[in-house]
Image (cartoon, coloured by chain):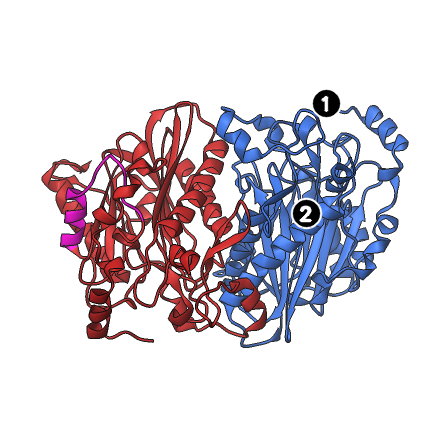
Chain colours: A red, B blue
Amino acid sequence: MKLTRRRFGRMMAALPIFVSMPRQATSEDKSKPGGLTDVAGVRVGHFTETRRPTGCTVIVVEKGAVAGVDVRGSAPGTRETDLLNPINTVQQVHAVVLAGGSAFGLDSASGVVQFLEEKGIGFDARVARVPIVPAAVLFDLGIGDPHIRPGREAGYQACLNATDGAIPEGNVGAGAGATVGKLLGPQRAMKGGLGTASIRSRKLVVAALVAVNAVGDVIDPQTGEILAGLREADGKTLANSIKQLREISSFSRSELLQSTTIGVIATNAAFDKAAMTKMAQMAHDGLARTINPVHLPTDGDTIFALSTGEISGEDLGRVGALAAAVMSEAVVRAIRKASGIPGYPSHSDLKKS
Amino acid sequence: MKLTRRRFGRMMAALPIFVSMPRQATSEDKSKPGGLTDVAGVRVGHFTETRRPTGCTVIVVEKGAVAGVDVRGSAPGTRETDLLNPINTVQQVHAVVLAGGSAFGLDSASGVVQFLEEKGIGFDARVARVPIVPAAVLFDLGIGDPHIRPGREAGYQACLNATDGAIPEGNVGAGAGATVGKLLGPQRAMKGGLGTASIRSRKLVVAALVAVNAVGDVIDPQTGEILAGLREADGKTLANSIKQLREISSFSRSELLQSTTIGVIATNAAFDKAAMTKMAQMAHDGLARTINPVHLPTDGDTIFALSTGEISGEDLGRVGALAAAVMSEAVVRAIRKASGIPGYPSHSDLKKS
C-alpha cells in the first residue's frame, strides 16, 4: 500500500489521533520518570512537521560536551562523525541532531549551526567560533510526500523549542515518521516513535533519547514480550520476526531500507573521547536487547554519547552498562508513547483492539 | 577466596563432579540439537586440561573459509585478526582457535599451525603453505594454578580430537575455566562453559559455538530469566547485576579482568570478507541479548564468522539475524551444560538446591 500524497492527506484529516499537535499529545508526559534533560546543561527541542510525519530533534549542550559515536548499522546517514574519532583534535560538540528525511534531513544540522553561531557558541578558531554539530538521520520518506523533509529551518526551530524540562515523546521530532516491524513490508508494520529515559545513582545521571525506526520487533527485555513489530496477516496480532526469518528465504530489501534507529546517551560523568566512544558502543547493547533484528546491512543505527564532565571518578564499565540499560528503557518508552497513523497502528492501538 | 595450587588440587580430588573427564561428562549430549559441525566441512576439537580447569577449542576448516571478526570487548587477546580486515589480501582461514590462559593461551594457535602444516594445508605462498589461524583467548588464570595454560601441545591435541560429529559442551576446551557473574568478585560468581547450537532453514545452516566467561549475568532472552550470574550473599539465589550497578559506586576492576566471551559463527552460505565481518558484528547482538553487562572495558569479547561458501544467494541481513539468534542459543546452552567446580556452582547446581 503505497500512499500518494493526496490520499495520505485525506487519511490524516480523517484521523484526529494523528493531527493532534505534539505538545498536546504529550502533555500527560509531564509526570514521566526522567529523560535526557535530567543531565544538567542538556536541552532538547523537537521540530515536528505538520504536513506529513517527519521532523528533527536537537540536543543542545551550549557549554560543550565530550562526545563519542558508534555507527553499527551498515546504511548510515551521518555528519561530523569523523571528528569524533578519538585520534582527532576537537574534543567537544555543542549539539547533536537526530532527523527524519534520510540524507536530505542532514540539512537540519545546518540550522542548528546557524542558531549556535548567532549565540556565539562554537570551537574557537580565532577568526570564527565554529559550532560542532554531529548528526544522524533515519529513513521515513515512505510515510507521505517524500519531498517534505526536515531542513535548515526545521533545525533552527528545534533549537528555539529546546527546553531543559520534560521532553515530549511518541510521534514527535525525529520519531514523527518512525515505524517498526517492516520485515514483510509496510502493510504489516507498526508505528515507532521517540522515547527518553534516565537513571540516577547518587550524583551520577545517565540518560538516553532514541528515535526507533526499525525493521525488527521491539521487545520488553524484562519479560521477552514483543511490544510492537511485524503483524500477522490479520493485522491485529503480533508475529515474531525471528521466527519468520527462520522460514522465509529473503527479506523485501527495498522496504528494509526504510529503517534506522538513532539515539543519544548523555551523562554528567567526566570521560574523554575514547571512553565516550566505548560508551556509545555499549549503549548499542540496549538496542540489541529491545530490537530484533537490529544492526542490519540496511539499517543506519547510530548512537552518540555526550559527557558534560560534571562529576569525576566514575567507572566507565559501570556507566557504560547503565547507558545500555537506559537506552533499553528509552526504546520501550518510544513504543509505548507512539500513536497510530494511517496504515501504522501503535502498541496502544493493538492493546485496545 | 584466592585458591592456592595445593588447596585447589585437594578440593578437586574431593569433588567427583569436576574430575569426571569431558567425554564422559558429555556423553549424554549425543542427542543434542545441532551444533557448529552441522556446517559441512567444519570440524571441532577440544583439549581440556586435567590439572586445572582450562583448555582450548579448535575449529578446523581444511578447505578454507572466508572469515570476518568483530572485537567488541576492550581488553582483547587475539592473533591474526588484522588479516581479517576486508581490505587485506588473504581471503580464507583454515582454522580458528579459542583458548583459556589469557595472552599465554595464544600459544595454542601455534600447535594448530603445526598440525595444518604437517597436513599440507595453508595459503599457497609458493615456497611454503602458510596455515591461517586466527585466535582469541579468555582469562581463566584465577581458577587454580595460573602457570598451567593451554600451549602449543594443547592446540595440536585439540586438532587430533577434532570431529565432524557431536561437540562436547559444558566444562570443556576453552570453556573449562570459564566463569560468570563476577561483578562483586569470585565469591559470588558461578560456572560458565562452552556451548554450541545451529539453525537450519532449507539448505541454509547457521551455527554458533561460544565459551562464556563474563562479568555479567546470563539471561534467557525468551523470558528475561537470569540463568546464572551474580549470587546473593546467601550463595543460593541470583542477584541482578544491573540492579546492583545502579546502586554500587564501582566494580572491583581487578576481578573484572577475569572475563571475556569468545565465539565463532559458521555458515554454509557464500559471502565475502566484508559480509562476514558484518555477520560477526551482528552476532554480538546474540551476546548482548543473553549476557548483561557485556562488552565491558575489561572484557575481550570477540566473535569470528566463517563461510564455507556451499550455497549462494542468501541475504546477509537474514543470515546475520539468524547468526545473532543462534549465538544466543549457544550462550544459553553453555550455561545449562556447565558443571560446578569448587567455589563456582553451575546453573544446574542452583536449580537443585
The residue at the point 68 percent across, 45 percent down is B106
Label 1 SS: loop
Q: In this view, does B8 lie to the left or right of B228?
A: right
Q: In this view, does B43 lie to the left or right of A202?
A: right
Residue segment shown in magenta: A152-169
User: Which of pointers 1 and 2 lies earlier in the amino acid sequence?
Assistant: 1
Q: Is residue B276 left or right of residue B341?
A: left
Task: Using the image, name the chain to which the residue with label 2 belongs.
Answer: B
Image quarter of residue A130: top left
> Which quadrant does the N terminus of chain A fall into?
bottom left
Q: What whole-number distance in Å separates the C-alpha atoms at marks 1 and 2? A: 24 Å
The residue at the point 55 percent across, 27 percent down is B251
What residue would you read off at disc 2? Answer: B211
Image quarter of residue A116: top left
x then y, percent, for residue A229: 45, 61
Residue situated in front as seen by the camera: B337 or A92:
B337
Q: Say whether residue B276 is visible.
A: no
Task: Using the image, name the chain to which the residue with label 1 belongs.
Answer: B
Q: Which residue lies furthest to the front in this view?
A: A353
The residue at the point 57 percent across, 34 percent down is B241
x then y, percent, for residue B235: 71, 28
Residue B1's label in the rendered image is 1
Label 2 SS: strand
